Amino acid sequence: MRILLTGANGLFGQHLLTLLTYRQGYEVFATGKGENRNPSGQYTYLPCDLTNQAEAKKLIASARPDYLIHAAAKTQVDDCETNRKLCWDSNVGATRYLLNEMSKSGGHFQYISTDFVFDGERGNYIETDEPAPVNYYGESKLEAEKLVQASGLGWSITRTVLVYGVGRDMSRSNIITWIYKSLKNKQPIKVVTDQIRTPTNVNDLAEGSFLILQKEAKGIFHISGDEIMSPYDLAIKIADYFDFDRNLITPVDASTFSQAGRRPQKTGFIINKARQVLGYNPKSFDEHLSMLESRLLGFYE
């Protein structure tokens, strides 16, 4: 099977690409904007600006994928709010170009989406709950979901929540690396208590995405951790695990920060469908902290 992964230079893309290259039976193609930030392996890297229709067409013609996993996106919520054209071009336009090219030969299209398609009024969302985004980033991801579902291709949508982990040559931090680096350097931080999530380790997300591919599953799947936590909860756990000073952490509510894009208050997923259909079984946050310890130490020494 020929697989094309977009967004291969991002945190999730790096981990899924590593997983795919260790599996038999797949000819893997990876793409990102600019140079390849991944080590050499059994795959072909094809740089591409997916917002350019001609480049997207050339990419699909070169890779000829049977299965496309579309992880590339503009995900910075505030940037999406203030630069709406770039957000729409990146999240909707690029998806439309890929779908149009894929539809010429057929195949399966797996789209990586987000909990921010929901309004955050109650949390614990299941796949059949009605989306109602409260920011432009969420609107763009929901519109792309609709394009995928209407494409006529085999499709799956993988929604996830607050992804964390350590990657190579990371251009942006995530919540865990930010908390760890700040506390290690004895820098005080303000962390919100009133945004509720089910944080997702990037390895679990990669495994969930691969299970969807492997089982040829179709439809929407919620792939996340299964522990309901706030960012403040995460910060306290990290401080305790690494014996950092808890007093550096100040609990605040979201109104403390001036942000262009509104965040949904309560998201988080119920992952029963993924457990039952895919056999998905995420590790606990404490288990992941233990596994991340050496990588965090190595990354910030």
Image: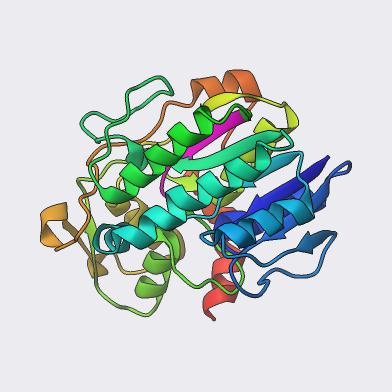
Residue 86 x %, y %: 37, 62
Residue at 72 percent across and 26 percent down: it is 215
Q: Quadrant of residue 256?
A: bottom left
Q: Tell whether 62 sits left or right of 91.
A: right
Magenta residue check for 45: no
Residue 130 x %, y %: 32, 23
Q: Tell whether 43 sits left or right of 269.
A: right
Rendered position, 86 above or below 208: below
Residue at 35 percent across and 73 percent down: it is 182
Rendered position, 92 above or below 301: above
Magenta residue check for 158: yes
Q: Which of 136 and 237 is in front in this view?
A: 136
Q: Which of 42 and 194 is in front in this view?
A: 42
Q: Image quadrant for the N terminus? A: top right
Q: In which quarter of the image is residue 205?
A: top right
Residue 226 x %, y %: 45, 33
Residue 221 x %, y %: 52, 28
Q: Quadrant of residue 167?
A: bottom right
Asked if one can make out residue 106 in the rendered structure from this viewpoint, the answer is yes
Q: Tell whether 162 sits left or right of 2.
A: left
Magenta segment, prevailing SS (helix, strand or loop): strand
Q: How many numbered discs?
A: 0
Residue stretch rendered in magenta on the structure: 155-162
Residue at 29 percent across and 64 percent down: it is 83
